[in-house]
Each structure stands twice: as structure tokens, then as C-alpha cells.
Amino acid sequence: MKLDKKHQHQLKLCISTRCNFCRRACPIYEVSGMEFDSPRAWLEVINEAIEGRVDSLEIMSLLNKCTLCRKCVGACPHGIETPEIILDFKSRIRGEYIPEPIEILDKKGEIEVDREYRIKVAYPWIYVKNFILNANPLGEKPKKEGLIADADFVFFPGCITNYKDKEVYEACVKFFKKVGAKYSVINACCYSELKPLGFSVDEIRRLFEKRHPHLRGMKIVTPCAGCYHTLKEDHKLNVMHISELIYQHKNKIKRGIEGEVTLHDPCKLGRYHGKFQQSREIIQQTGAKLVELRQNKKESHCCGGGGSLKYYYPQMQENVCENLIKLNEKKATIVTNCSYCKQTINKNTKQKAKHLIELI
Ligand code: SF4
Ligand code: SF4
């Protein structure tokens, strides 16, 4: 088995360097303190598996800890893309556990018994099954979609906003009304959660397009940083994060928020796409005093919501999230730009984070 050329080259470069600059950047190493919970160690075990010295199943329990936050990439002098290498490796061995996704979709979730043990050990099977049966990780019944012909854009709330966060959903709708926008709604999953389960970008794109062939060419607006990244990078769609839409209408924002507000930059919007400034200007426009977390922008601390961590290591996720909260030294109101980050912070800590749209 081989990774793609770029990842294979990066892997060898790291193995010959082993400088470990990435370790201190990693939120998992920060909570664990153990050498085997670090980017360099995970690259090392991937190399061992590729060269046939360890079973790929044996190392899944380590790789499933990565939140895909990409902080290690900025810390590495060679820019080695550890999260992408991990996803590449997982996608190449997935066939050993889960067969062709279209095939399982067609069989409505049935799977051969002899594969079931390995799948259960390597993957959170319940989530895979939810995707297969309901096309989302939460197991919720798909909602009706409302496409209208002359809409300005398609509103893509994403699973968390759609099924778990009425406040964010309603705040988005209220904002669209306020700015006079005409919109359609797609209550669907972007399929990003399938990637840490070992599905390749090509596979998730194919699955997504099969369900939503009409989205190509349309303008999409989403309040979720994870959906934004996946729709843009993986599905190559024309997507805008809701903070960009708010920014376009920032003269309509009423001042009236008092006190100190701090912004958590979601990894998938900030570090992945460099979107930092507009949200800060929006917060200032509300009248609130913007104060920064001790680590912010490119150095932002992950909330722990990405990758497979939440499925396998909930305690570790809680500890990662607590470390993020500790950076709020001024105890300001925490605002984030992502429905998933908001949910992760509110589930794991005593803080009540808000989504940026809830300030408007
Ligand atoms: S900083 Fe880069 S080269 Fe050094 S150990 Fe980490 S990934 Fe490898
Ligand atoms: S992406 Fe984040 S969690 Fe994964 S190895 Fe890099 S720093 Fe650690």
C-alpha cells in the first residue's frame, strides 16, 4: 500500500527528520502528555503499517484521536500535512473494513458478518450506519428540501444547526428576512464526517452529488465552518460562510451589545481558509468590546470537535475543550463561527458559547 506521492514524500521526510516541533502544537499531546499521542508518533506508526511491520487495525486507536485541526502543519518547518496523511492512510485501508459505500447504501446498511468485528473495532459503526440509512451522522430522518426558482442563494444549515440548534437556525432565518434575501433550503449533511471514517474525498463527493445533483452552480450559504470547508474544498461548490454574508450587510447591524466578547476561530474557517478579520469587525460593529483568546487566528485552539475524537475518546475531547476555555482569561462571552464548535463547547464546558449570527 502507498499513499499519494506528496504524502508519501512528506512521510519519508518526517521519518528522516523526527524534529518533533509539531508535538507542542497538538491539542491531543497537550492533554495526554504521552509521546504516542503526537503527530510525529502517528506518522511513525503509519510508516510502520505501510512497511508491513504493524497491522493497520492496531494503529487505528491512535489515529482516531486526531481532530484534524491542522495546528501541527503550521508548527512543522517542512509544512508536513499530518491530518491529510492520516486521512489518506485511513481511506486506503477502509476497504479492509467497509465495502464500497454505494454498495452498502443500496443494501440499506446490511453488511457481511465476517467484516463486522473489524468495522466495530476500527470505526464508530453506529455513525456509519446512520449515514447509510439516513444520510447524516445523527440518525435523524432526512427533512424535506425547499428549492425555489428565483432564490438569491441556498441556505445549507448542516446537521447540527438543522437538528440540534434551533437558536442558530432561527437567527439565520431572521437575518435573511432583515436583509430581504430570498432563499431555498437544503436540510442535508455535507458528508464531512465520513472522511475521518476512511472515506476518500472522491467517494464523499460522489455520494453527495448522487443526492444533490442540482447544487452545482448554485450559491450556497452555511453557518457551519465544517460544512463550509467540505462544500468548498471537497465538493467544489460555490459556498459562502454566513459571516461573509453578514459582512456584506454590516451597515444593517444594530449596535446594542454590551460587555466583552471573544471570538473562537474554528479550525475549518480560520486555519484552513484564513478567514479571521470580517468576524472581528462584525463583533465590533455590534458595540461589544472584542477581546482576544490567548491563542487566536492561526494559533487558535481546537475545540476538540473534529475528526473521530468525539466518537472514541469523549473524555479527551472534554479536556481539549477545557484547554480552549482556559485561554479566555478575561472571561468574556465566547462567540464562535461554527455550529459544531458551539455545540462542542456547550456540551463539554460550563461556558455558554454563542454563534456569531446570534449576536446580530
Ligand atoms: S515537525 Fe514536521 S518533520 Fe518534525 S516531527 Fe513533526 S511532522 Fe515530522
Ligand atoms: S491535526 Fe491537530 S490533532 Fe491532528 S496531529 Fe495535527 S495538531 Fe494534532
Image (tube, rainbow, N blue to C red):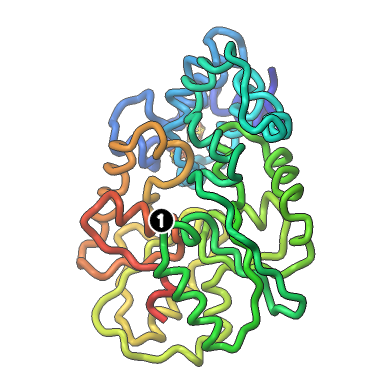
Taking the spot 72% from the left edge, 50% from the top edge, the residue there is 211
Q: Height in image: 54 above or below 158?
A: above
> How many residues crowd mark 1 within 10 Å: few (<14), some (14–19), many (20+)?
many
Q: Position of residue 131 (x, y in %)?
A: 58, 40
Q: Is residue 317 above or below residue 293?
A: above
Instruction: In the rendered view, tell whether residue 102 sits above or below residue 121.
Output: below
Can the viewer see residue 75 in this picture?
Answer: no
Residue 53 in view of the camera? yes
Q: Amino acid at mark 1?
A: Cys
The residue that disc 1 covers is: 341
Q: Residue at x 31, y 82 (%)?
A: 288
**Residue 349 rendering spot, x and y as whole percentages:** 24, 52
* Disc 1, SS: helix
Q: Residue at x 32, y 90 (%)?
A: 256
- Name the residue nearer the viewer: 215 or 55: 215
Q: Position of residue 146 (x, y in %)?
A: 66, 68
Q: Which quarter of the rendered picture does the N terminus lie within?
A: top right
Q: Nearer the viewer, residue 53 or 336?
A: 336
In the picture provided, is 97 more to the left or to the right than 1? left
At horizontal 51% and vertical 86% (from top left) the residue drawn is 250
Which quadrant would residue 292 be assigned to in this image?
bottom left
